[in-house]
Image (cartoon, rainbow, N blue to C red):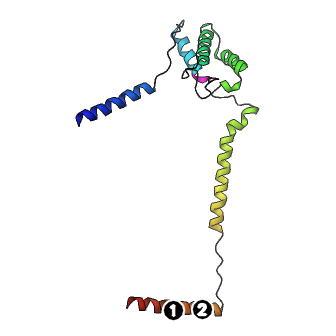
Amino acid sequence: MRLWLTAILFSLGLLSIGVNATPVDTYEFKSTENQQRAIALAHELRCPQCQNQDLVDSNSPVARDLRLEVYKMVDAGQSDDEIIQFMTSRYGDFVLYKPKLESKTYVLWMGPFALLLIGLAIGFVFIRKQRITPEKVTELSKEEQKQLDALLKQNKVDSKEEKE
């Protein structure tokens, strides 16, 4: 039993180690500040081929080339804005994980909030409609009251007969 438990725990441990692996680049930076800045920039840029991974997490050849380009530009002394401008001029705003707030991206930034507000408004209207609309209580006519009394008497008689 202990052997099985040890084997399961060992295999789970190995799985969790392999999941967090990232590609290793062997580029040498002029300083550790440049290295940290380049890696941070590569995390902010999306791989044009993968479309759902940043440059650091992607293993595609395009991402590798773009990472190297970012690393070289950082070591050359270019600012973050210059590097981002270069990448967006080459690949468009899609390459940014956090697109700028511009007139063409208002839907992207405000869309979720608008959908949330619309959903809340619809929910509010339905809940309010259910609470406000009371059922109209109408009185029974004499004939309807007689029919109801007859049904209730018949029901009482039937229930007494079932008990006996």
- Looking at the image, is 106 positioned above or below residue 70? below
| Of the pair 33 and 142, the residue shown nearer to us | 142
Q: Quadrant of the N terminus?
A: top left
Q: Quadrant of the C terminus?
A: bottom left
**Disc 1 packing (10 Å; few <14; some 14–19; many ≥20):** few
Q: Position of residue 16 (x, y in %)?
A: 40, 29
Disc marking residue 147: 2
Residue at 53% across, 9% down: 27
Given contact means CB atoms under 8 Å apart, are the residues at marks 1 and 2 in contact?
no
Structural distance between the alpha carbons of marks 1 and 2: 11 Å
Q: Position of residue 147 (x, y in %)?
A: 60, 91
| Of the pair 32 and 4, the residue shown nearer to us | 4
- Tell me if residue 17 is in the magenta stretch: no
Q: Position of residue 118 (x, y in %)?
A: 68, 50
**Disc 2 packing (10 Å; few <14; some 14–19; many ≥20):** few
The residue identified by callout 1 is 154
Residue at 62% across, 16% down: 66
The boundaries of the magenta stretch are: 43-53
Q: Position of residue 119 (x, y in %)?
A: 65, 51
Q: What type of secondary structure mainly makes up the magenta span? A: loop
Q: Name which residue type carries label 2.
A: Gln
- Tell me if residue 47 is in the magenta stretch: yes
| Of the pair 8 and 139, the residue shown nearer to us | 8
